């Protein structure tokens, strides 16, 4: 039935066991716990162990989400993965995850939207399901930013962490209805946040590695200002589209890049800080994984109540921006 409701039937997340604290970073680069905490709100982040990958983290998060949804891996007919750090350039991390789950038929592919990966993947999943053919979809965002971080660059290495978050979308589910989305991008700002090497413009070579072009470079201050503006305008657009206001929002679930960005966004939207879900202190910036990990934590810790209105909003490399309103 084309008009069956599509909802978030289950959630799951995984973060690696290894904790890297600000005190650990003080021994690696010229920084202090005080600088990191006051500028970003981050106290510690998680880092993969040897052998862990995007698809291995995603498998653990996916099995938790499938269990909570009551959906068997073989019943999935769609897997969409938002990631900029797939296990390998080819095949997609979604195909590797599918194989780990023992599913042999689901349409599986990655998308690249950096920190907006989850919200982008969520809208693609919902729209494909509305087309009629798919009944159960796995929407994943997983990143190992530690593998593209320059651990000698204090401007960036204090910010990032690794993790995976998953949502299961099911037809006929009335929990977690996605009311609307607002996605956008402006590639004119691409150089503010980029990994130069590893693609067709700059294939990996010894020279490229010596120049450390395989790592994330960011103009943090410029990104900061654009982040606040684009998150506020994305949130306002999606609220307008649904005829709702920020007073209707129960939870603001923003991309967790920096506590100051989240507070500035909440203030401009007139949402009290007590209604902002925050875990950046424990995990740092895990790119697209931050939003689904926040959602799964809220779900599994009993924070979400049926009927709650969740405003998810993100921005990231591209630059990309995205917002979604979900009725739990
Ligand atoms: N420890 C100590 N000092 C530092 C560190 C550090 N780790 N890093 C930078 N500094 C210094 C700088 O060198 C600078 O010194 P100067 O004034 O002598 O030149 C000073 O601190 C201030 O630097 P700013 O860059 O102006 O600091 P700012 O307040 O902007 O904070 C930060 C930097 C945290 C990076 C902030 O700009 C930010 O969060 N930007 C947005 C990041 C983001 O959200 N990116 C997008 C998502 S990532 C993705 O898509 C994968």
Image (tube, rainbow, N blue to C red):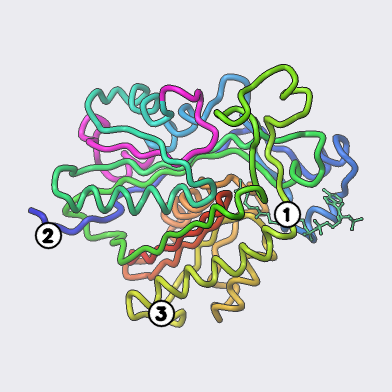
Along the line of sight, the residue nearer the viewer: 118 or 18: 118
Horizontal and vertical percent position of residue 222: 71, 60
Q: Quadrant of residue 75?
A: top left
Q: Position of residue 65 (x, y in %)?
A: 36, 42
- Which numbered mark, 1 or 3, is in the foreground of this view? 1
Q: How far is disc 1 from disc 3 in space, using C-alphas?
A: 32 Å
Residue position for label 3 = 248
* Quadrant in which residue 303 is drawn: bottom left
Q: Which disc is residue 220 wearing?
A: 1
Circle 2 — which element? loop
Q: Is residue 13 visible?
A: no
Asked if ligand 1 lies within 8 A of label 1, the reply is: yes
Of pointers 2 and 1, the one earlier in the residue sequence: 2
Instruction: Please give left or right for residue 100 compared with residue 315 in the image.
Output: left
Q: Which residues are magenta?
A: 63-91
Q: Which residue is mark 2?
A: 3
């Amino acid at each position: 039935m084309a008009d069956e409701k599509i909802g978030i039937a289950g959630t799951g997340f995984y973060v690696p066991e290894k904790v890297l604290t600000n005190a650990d970073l003080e021994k690696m680069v010229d920084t202090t716990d005080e600088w990191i905490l006051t500028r970003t709100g981050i106290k510690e982040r998680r880092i993969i162990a040897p052998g862990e990958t995007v698809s291995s983290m995603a498998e653990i998060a996916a099995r938790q989400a499938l269990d909570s949804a009551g959906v068997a891996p073989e019943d999935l007919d769609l897997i969409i993965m938002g990631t900029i750090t797939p296990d390998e350039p080819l095949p997609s991390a979604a195909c590797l995850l599918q194989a780990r789950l023992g599913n042999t038929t689901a349409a599986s592919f990655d998308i690249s939207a950096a920190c907006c990966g989850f919200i982008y993947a969520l809208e693609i999943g919902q729209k494909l399901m509305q087309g009629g053919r798919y009944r159960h979809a796995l929407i994943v965002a997983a990143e190992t930013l530690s593998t593209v971080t320059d651990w000698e660059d204090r401007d960036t290495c204090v910010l990032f962490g690794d993790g995976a978050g998953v949502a299961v979308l099911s037809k006929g589910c009335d929990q977690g209805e996605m009311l609307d989305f607002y996605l956008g991008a402006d590639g004119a700002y691409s150089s503010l946040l980029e990994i130069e090497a590893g693609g067709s413009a700059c294939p990996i070579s010894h020279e490229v590695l010596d120049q450390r072009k395989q790592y994330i470079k960011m103009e943090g201050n410029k990104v900061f200002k654009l982040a606040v503006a684009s998150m506020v305008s994305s949130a306002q657009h999606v609220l307008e589209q649904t005829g709702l206001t920020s007073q209707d929002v129960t939870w603001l679930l923003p991309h967790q890049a920096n506590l100051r960005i989240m507070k500035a966004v909440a203030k401009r939207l007139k949402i009290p800080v007590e209604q902002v879900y925050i875990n950046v202190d424990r995990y740092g910036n895990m790119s697209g994984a931050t939003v689904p990990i926040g959602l799964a934590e809220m779900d599994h810790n009993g924070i979400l109540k049926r009927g709650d209105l969740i405003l998810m909003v993100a921005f990231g490399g591209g630059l990309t921006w995205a917002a979604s309103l979900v009725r739990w």
